[in-house]
Amino acid sequence: MQWREWISRQLETKPAELTEETGARAVVTFAARLTFEGVERRYGTYYALHQVDLDISPGEVVCLLGPSGCGKTTLLRIASGVEKPSAGRVLINDREVAGPNRFVPPEKRSVGLMFQDFALFPHLSILENVAFGLKASPRAEALREATAVLSRVGLLKFANAYPHTLSGGQQQRVALARAIVPRPSVMLMDEPFSGLDVQLRDAMQEQTLALLRETRATSLIVTHHPEEAMRLGDRIAVMRNGRIIQLGQAEDLYDQPADLFVARMFSEINEVGYPVADGQIETPLGRLQASDALSQGDNAVVCIRERGIELKPVGQGLPGRVLHVRFLGDIDLLEIGVQGFEAPLRVRTPHYAQWAKGAEVGVEIDAARVLIFPENGDPV
Ligand code: ATP
């Protein structure tokens, strides 16, 4: 049966009234403030979350970024209500939904959830999968709303199909439609793009962000890809070992990473170790000022961004020689032996610059843009 007839039977509407309007508006939600206050989660003696404070404004998109096991999913589960904090409070619009004296179950929190594996029901049609998000509503109304949202994500023609017949990107859109159809005030997404291949991921990130903006839902998105976090998040919360170690806009995290761990996440860097003497670090770039976090005799890690090194004709900057060239598409990754540095420095330059192996070059490094951290990676 054609999709138009199939939907019209479900909705008791004439086929002519149904159009595949991919430009249709999504439902608009009442965005809410989402606040975590001193949230902890312990499993026995193990702390999956330590004292997490995070305040997300209505309509804001925040990405939780960090390595595997750092507590991202646990924080998301606590926000959704499928897990309880061991200590601390969660508030939605300043109303406590989890805390020492109160616990609001997930279905009463107005949160939408979307998982990495999409979790579609294989035995339900696409329309029924989306309408499942409205299982508390009368069936006719649920189907009508589900049809509108399916139309918004451009999948109305698959309404009577089953999940296994759809591509990964299409299944992702169905999962998104199902999460959004009940008009949640808060959207919680756990690695929503990691099941997609790289080309598809780009397009789906754009479309998802557009839909989140349109619905105005406050969103918390888990990822372990820095680029994805930069692309999607109004702010990024970087997590490690159950703590938020830095929170800010992408530019802040890139320009002023709190520690070596964050610096490594946001750019490719050369790390060169030097001892600290009299509050200074003697390097081939000149004498650099050590921060207060570094004491006499400590080892400092001087971080030089691979894209922060400029190659010039011989005679400018430090003398160097191109030791190796690797073609990476738009850019080349070079290894340069630079006077004063024991090990070669890696440099990323546009491919059109065409540096050849063996070439003599001038190497310019802006000392003001170099980052310095204690060797153990602590915050400066
Ligand atoms: P990933 O990116 O791999 O999903 P994550 O940052 O989301 O990781 P979580 O799933 O939040 O990490 O887990 C944080 C830590 O808590 C991990 O060390 C995990 O093993 C532990 N943990 C999570 N759930 C439980 C549980 N039910 N019992 C015991 N330990 C748990």
Image (cartoon, grey):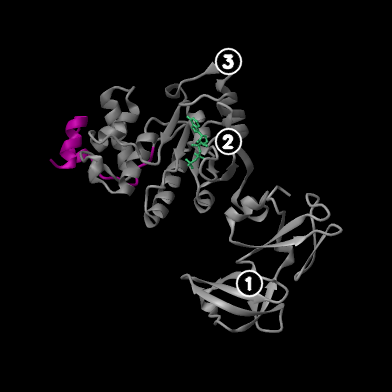
- What residue is at 84 percent from the left and 59 percent from the top? 277
Q: Find residue 20 and report its horizontal and vertical position in percent.
A: 26, 45
Tag 3 secondary structure: loop
Q: Residues within 10 Å of mark 3 (few under 14, many from 20)?
A: few
- Check residue 101 in the rendering and tell me which mark sits there, or answer none: 3
Label 2 CB-ligand 1 distance < 8 A: no
What residue range appears in magenta? 1-26
In three-dimensional space, the C-alpha distance between marks 2 and 3, rounded to whole angstroms, equals: 23 Å
Q: Amino acid at mark 2?
A: Ile
Q: Amino acid at mark 3?
A: Asn
**Are the two marked residues, 2 and 3, in contact with CB atoms closer than 8 angstroms?**
no
Q: Find residue 176 and report its horizontal and vertical position in percent.
A: 37, 40
Q: Which residue is mark 2?
A: 56
| In the rendered image, the vertical position of residue 84 relative to residue 17, given as above or below | above
- What residue is at 53 percent from the left and 33 percent from the top? 75
Q: Residues within 10 Å of mark 2 (few under 14, many from 20)?
A: some
Q: Nearer the viewer, mark 2 or mark 3?
A: 3
Tag 2 secondary structure: strand
In three-dimensional space, the C-alpha distance between marks 1 and 3, rounded to whole angstroms, equals: 59 Å
| In the rendered image, the vertical position of residue 61 relative to residue 50, given as above or below | below
